Image (spheres, grey):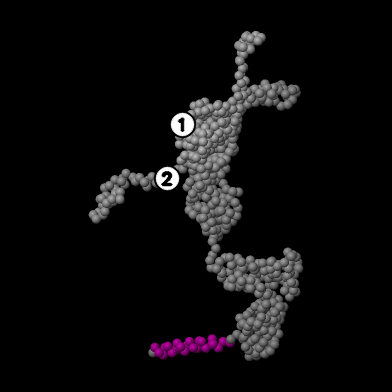
């Protein structure tokens, strides 16, 4: 029974398959193109070329749909000669002598052999074809990377570039590559201008390139590119998150959020600049803003002081300068490492990166005033300060320049004084050596300490130290031609009056910046100002003014230097000279002729003073509490360790010895 059932199934299958095998085959045997190639699947003919169509059956009649596109002529019983005339698509209908008929769809295309060869040179898998419904070239295939894909599209676009000599007027132009300076014109290979072409035949004049080439290895997206770019500059711990504004990613609308941590502010600025350049195409410096401060409070656009220039104004009108007393400010806008939220590129990049190392700098400053007049006549016993140094250089005994172990590179501390001790004393570069030197000079009455402030400031911020007072300086003026009773007359004093306060004393402004290798860049501006009575009298005498005024003797210096941690900087050269004449006499006796000279005395004082400043910056960092916790366990843990009894068979070692 089973055998009979299988026979029935086989019979049914043969009955169904019989009509299929009896279906007529395609009557087109092959198409022979102008280059001699023969293929039954050829359906694209190159414009202005002849092709031979060979059929399996005997032809009775042949017709073409669009004679303007293709012209056909019957050569024999089963051969047809076709001439491709116009770019487009048309159908060829054939009737055979057996009463059957067939229709074949052909396309007439331009000669793209040069472009095909160029694309094959780029990659052998790239294919090109014309879009059937529009004037466009379609690139297909599969390539390893996106570089091949972009190279193929660039080659196709350059090939389709139109115009001779840059002309794009209403004329027919020859198809040419943009790299060619001229082209051989041929009426058979012209492309119609925009005014004469139709959508079907405008392949070159206004054709587009549709790139459908597949890529095996996809290119990195913007976040992956940024992550790869910053990994080599210290940003390996930075995380990148993309916030999409729409349903799809859009580099013009989306926002990048950077989080994580970096080692220092130098790495942070590099990371933000690279992120801005890759994502927005602009430098971060043009639009980088600190949104919040260290505590998370909004800066409100006032992250920096209104006047951060060294040497702020007076006590009443100093503005926002730290030196003027008008209000505190900082440089948070420039030191973005302290900000908890930084906006870059108009908010398209938001940085929440934490900076692990934000050092402070302790600046120790010593200001000494040296009497150059007394220094020239000073001959001290320097055995106290010569200990540990080359004694042969003290007072020029042998002139040896060899230093003892631990001595500094600063050979002669008093070289900046320009006095008689130049080259006669050798002092180490530590603070202790300078303290000893100036203490000795101060005991001899040669030097006096003006100020010894020590300032601790965040790296990049400006700190100001001021010690002294303020002198009231009256001011009064009157407009020209007005008198006190508002009548027209000569100039008068006192119509408008007021009082300003001028600061005097010692003022120090310092800004320290720490680099990657702990090199300290120090901006320093010390100022010494004192009221000068003699200068005030000279000004009043020379101008003939009866108004009260005060002149000041000001000594200031502004410098920038780079030092290592703990290296002192010596600044000198601020010399001032005081010349005074003193005359005294006995009333009555001094007017007696001849003998009166015995009752008179006069003296002349000429003193030179020089300001010496010693600045020593030191980097101050926060201690790492994790190290202390790891090194010193809690008391409870120590107690538990002492109570735990090791199991039998376990060896206990202490100090490398088995107990």
The residue carrying mark 2 is 624
Q: Residue at x 52, y 57 (%)?
A: 228
What residue is drawn where x is 60% and y is 29%? Answer: 576
Is residue 431 or residue 21 the one in the foreground?
431
Crowdedness of circle 2 by 10 Å Cα count: few (<14), some, many (20+)? Answer: few
Q: Is residue 586 visible?
A: yes
Residue 213, position in %: x, y?
A: 58, 69
Residue wearing tag 1: 384
Q: Is residue 180 above or below residue 602?
A: below
- Residue nearest the viewer, comparing 348 with 16: 348
Q: Does dot 2 land on a helix, a strand or a loop? A: loop
Q: Measuring 48% from the left and 46% from the top, which residue is drawn there?
A: 357
- Give the CA separation, mark 2 to mark 1: 41 Å
Between disc 2 and disc 1, whose residue precedes? 1
> Residue 643 lies in magenta, yes or no?
no
Q: State yes or no: discs 2 and 1 in contact (Cβ < 8 Å).
A: no
Residue 341 appears in view: no
The relative height of residue 620 versus residue 605 in the rendered view (above or below) is: below
Q: Is 60 positioned to the left or the right of 340 in the image?
A: right
Q: Quadrant of the N terminus?
A: bottom left
Is residue 397 shown above or below 289? above
Task: Examine the residues drawn in magenta and state their main secondary structure.
Answer: helix
Identify whether 225 is placed above or below 491. below
Q: Where does the magenta region start and end? A: 2-24
């Amino acid at each position: 029974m089973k055998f009979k059932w299988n026979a029935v199934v086989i019979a049914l299958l043969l009955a169904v398959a019989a009509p299929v095998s009896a279906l007529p085959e395609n009557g087109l045997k092959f198409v022979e193109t102008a280059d001699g190639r023969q293929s039954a699947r050829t359906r694209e003919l190159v414009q202005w070329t002849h092709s031979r169509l060979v059929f399996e059956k005997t032809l009775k009649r042949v017709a073409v749909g669009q004679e303007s596109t293709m012209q056909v002529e019957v050569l024999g019983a089963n051969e047809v000669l076709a001439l491709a005339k116009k770019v487009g698509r048309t159908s060829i209908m054939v009737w055979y002598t057996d009463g059957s008929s067939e229709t074949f769809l052909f396309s007439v295309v331009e000669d793209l052999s040069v472009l095909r060869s160029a694309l094959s040179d780029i990659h052998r898998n790239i294919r090109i074809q014309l879009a059937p419904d529009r004037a466009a070239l379609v690139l297909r295939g599969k390539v390893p990377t996106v570089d091949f894909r972009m190279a193929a599209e660039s080659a196709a676009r350059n090939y389709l570039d139109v115009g001779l000599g840059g002309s794009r007027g209403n004329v027919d132009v020859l198809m040419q590559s943009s790299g060619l300076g001229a082209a051989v014109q041929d009426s058979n290979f012209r492309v119609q201008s925009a005014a004469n072409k139709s959508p079907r035949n405008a392949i070159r004049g206004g054709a587009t390139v549709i790139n459908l080439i597949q890529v095996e290895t996809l290119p990195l997206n913007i976040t992956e590119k940024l992550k790869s770019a910053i990994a080599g500059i210290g940003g390996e711990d930075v995380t990148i998150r993309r916030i999409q504004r729409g349903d799809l990613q859009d580099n013009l609308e989306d926002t990048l959020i950077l989080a994580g941590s970096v080692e220092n502010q130098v790495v942070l600025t590099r990371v933000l600049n690279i992120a801005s350049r890759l994502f927005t195409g602009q430098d971060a410096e043009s639009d980088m803003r600190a949104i919040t401060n260290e505590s998370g409070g909004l800066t409100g656009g006032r992250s920096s002081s209104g006047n951060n220039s060294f040497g702020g104004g007076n006590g009443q009108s100093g503005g926002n300068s730290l030196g003027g007393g008008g209000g505190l400010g900082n440089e948070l806008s420039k030191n973005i490492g302290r900000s908890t939220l930084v906006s870059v590129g108009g908010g398209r990049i938001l940085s929440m990166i934490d900076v692990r190392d934000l050092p402070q700098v302790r600046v120790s400053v010593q200001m000494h005033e040296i009497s150059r007049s007394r220094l020239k006549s000073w001959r001290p016993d320097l055995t106290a300060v010569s200990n540990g140094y080359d004694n042969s250089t003290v007072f020029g005994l042998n002139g040896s320049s060899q230093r003892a172990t631990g001595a500094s590179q600063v050979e002669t501390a008093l070289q900046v004084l320009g006095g008689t001790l130049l080259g006669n004393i050798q002092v180490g570069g530590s603070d202790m050596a300078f303290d000893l030197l100036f203490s000795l000079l101060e005991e001899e009455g040669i030097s006096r300490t003006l100020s010894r402030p020590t300032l601790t400031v965040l790296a990049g911020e400006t700190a100001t130290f001021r010690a002294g007072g303020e002198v009231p300086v009256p001011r009064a003026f009157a407009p020209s031609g007005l008198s006190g009773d508002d009548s027209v007359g000569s100039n008068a004093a006192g119509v408008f009056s007021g009082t300003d306060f001028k600061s005097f004393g010692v003022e120090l402004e310092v800004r320290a910046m720490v680099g990657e290798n702990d090199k300290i860049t120090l901006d320093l501006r010390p100022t010494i100002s004192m009221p000068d009575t003699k200068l005030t009298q000279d000004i009043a005498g020379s101008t003939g003014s009866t108004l009260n005024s005060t002149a000041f003797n000001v000594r200031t210096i502004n410098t920038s230097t780079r030092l290592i941690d703990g290296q002192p900087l010596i600044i000198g050269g601020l010399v001032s000279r005081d010349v005074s004449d003193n005359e005294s006499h006995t009333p009555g006796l001094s007017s007696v002729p001849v003998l009166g000279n015995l009752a008179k005395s006069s003296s002349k004082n000429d003193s030179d003073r020089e300001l010496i400043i010693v600045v020593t910056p030191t980097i101050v960092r926060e201690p790492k509490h994790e190290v202390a916790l790891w090194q010193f366990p809690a008391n409870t843990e120590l107690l538990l360790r002492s109570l735990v009894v090791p199991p039998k068979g376990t060896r206990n070692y202490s100090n490398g010895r088995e107990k």
